[in-house]
Image (cartoon, coloured by chain):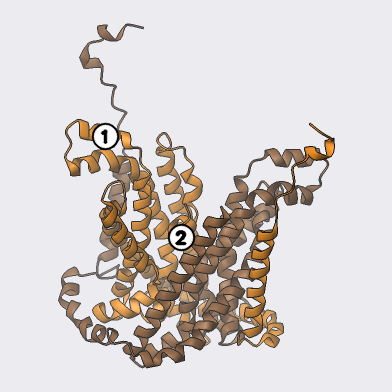
Chain colours: A orange, B brown
Amino acid sequence: MTASVTLRPAEPSHARRNAGFIAAAALVIWAVLTVEADWTELAEVPGGIARLFFRLFLENGVDWTYLPTAAEAMLDSIWIAWVGTIIGAVISLPIGFFGARNVSSGLISNVVRQVLNAIRAFPELVLVIVIFIPIAGLGAVAGALAVGLHSVGTLGKLTAEVVEGIDPGPVEATRAAGGRALQVQRWGVLPQVLPEIIAFWLYRFEINIRAAAILGVVGAGGIGTVVQETIVYRRYDKAGMAILVVIVATILIDAVSGWVRRRIIEGAEARTDAGDVEGLGSPLRMDSDIG
Amino acid sequence: MTSAASVPPAHARPAKPPRSYLPLLGLAAFVVVTWLSVGEEFGIGLDPGLLVENLGRGTGIWAEFLEPNWSFLPETFGPLLETFQMAVIAAAVGCGIALPVSFLASRVSTPNVATYLADRGLLSIVRAIPDLLYALIFVAAVGIGPLAGILALVFFNIGVVAKLLSETIDGVDTGPLEATRAAGANRIQTQRWAVLPQVLPNYVAYSLYTFELNIRASTVIGLVGAGGLGVLLNTQRAFFRYDNLAVIIVELFVLVFAIEFFSIWLRRRLV
């Protein structure tokens, strides 16, 4: 050891980080300057929002007589999310197995993954316009099918990832005990992954509630139609009621579904290191390629 | 303890755990709800037979989809650029606001229970409103155009980032917190030097992720007039110009994939 000054390690270079930061800042500034939004209107935004809030909830209060209509429409949205999630779950389970490298072959899993990526690229609203309204016509069925297809994309990818993360021990054991290919999946793989996958299904249901609440904007059923029409026709007290129904129903379902999810995962805690509980709440696991 | 050899084989197998009726109960509830949901009377009236029968109805429209009108392409560049700009601005503003909001939504950084619960409650309301509903609300408040779209995306982003980041803050290593406090730091200094460095890489990753989400979302919020590619999508849909719609959809597809690849590449470099 030499003088005490050298004891401190040299600071790592921040050049790259700073360059990234500057690039991001430049991009934002460029966007602000070039976008065709009238920024002078920005001053009127708080007033506009306050006025709308006043009209929606305060001017005449929300219209409680509209509650049954709004609740019924929200129930339709919940059904759309429910049916869509089931469609997604049923189809994505086998697909997920084919998408897992350790279970199917490298080529098949690659093809399956790409197809799933392609499905995920389209929002439910685009799917419903392009594919399902032509088949099923306007209405909740088209909405449920679109939600289902999009869910296949996200759930299939997650299932594949979970299957890839299994402990190979039970698989070997099942094979050693004479299990055939399908039996190996059923007894060696499925019990390991099912709790986590069911928790993902529930989480997807929570997301699908939000998707189903807006599908009505293009005529695919649910409360979206109600909210849009009441706002467009300036029936603000009714719109306020409908928005309130969306918020309350969504929060309630989140709470129930979250409780069930935690219950399922805690039951499975003995198997995993429980690190998944954190990741479960995050849409990051649902929609992106992190990890 | 008896030796293994002396135990009769019949006892070698451990006793089965007691049977729980909870899964059965859950299954019964599932069947009832599903039966209600597909039924005609209460639910959506899903008839698979009818659906298969009507499968052919779409073919005429899909045939038009398969012949994209590429001469429409130049008209889409403006709205496409707008979608991109909206996504950039909203991600920057939304993630910026979400940073302090997330610190207030975690018990690690906000010991005051009232503040913490109030912030959490507000956040769950923000998260309960879907992106398109925000767009409807802001179009009604500030008029049609990209400004309403940006505002809608900002709120949507605050909900996403604040949830992810507050959970990350919940899970930080408390060692550095103690060390900073022991060194005499006040509350804000503790957050700055003990918490922020731990969660910063995640924060950057979440911000990139919301940018990706925005690209996708900003195409749909235009359906209610909030700017971007969705406005075009809506007008072409209204005129049944499926050949033009096909162009928009191909473009959307390419854009989403390009952004996703870029984002994954960037995140790999970050970690």
- The disc placed on residue B30 is none
Q: Looking at numbered disc 1 in the image, what kind of residue is underneath it?
A: Glu
Q: Name the residue at 47% across, 40% down.
A: A274
Observer-nearest residue: B153 or A229? B153
Q: Name the residue at 47% across, 66% down.
A: B260
The answer to whether residue A232 is visible is: no
Crowding near the residue tagged with mark 1, few <14, some 14–19, many ≥20 C-alpha atoms within 10 Å: some
Observer-nearest residue: B113 or A281? A281
- Of tags 1 and 2, the one toward the viewer is 1
What x and y, as percent, mark residue A190? 29, 43
To which quarter of the image does residue A171 belong? top left
Q: Looking at numbered disc 2 in the image, what kind of residue is underneath it?
A: Ser
Q: Chain of mark 1?
A: A
What x and y, as percent, mark residue B267? 54, 58
Asked whether the beta carbons under mark 1 and mark 2 sit within 8 Å of each other, the answer is no
- The disc placed on residue A288 is 2
Crowding near the residue tagged with mark 2, few <14, some 14–19, many ≥20 C-alpha atoms within 10 Å: some
Q: Name the residue at 73% across, 50% down.
A: B191
The answer to whether residue B155 is visible is: yes
To which quarter of the image does residue B173 belong? top right
Q: Check the image and report above or below for A198 versus A2.
A: below
First in sequence, mark 1 or 2: give its number: 1
What x and y, as percent, mark residue B222? 49, 82
Task: Locate residue A45 relative to residue A124 in the image: left or right.
Answer: right
Q: Chain of mark 2?
A: A
Observer-nearest residue: B202 or B28? B202
Q: Which residue is mark 1?
A: A172
In the displayed orientation, state which residue is furthest to the front. Answer: A2
Q: Check the image and report above or below for A182 versus A20.
A: above
- Describe the element under mark 1 as helix, strand or loop: helix
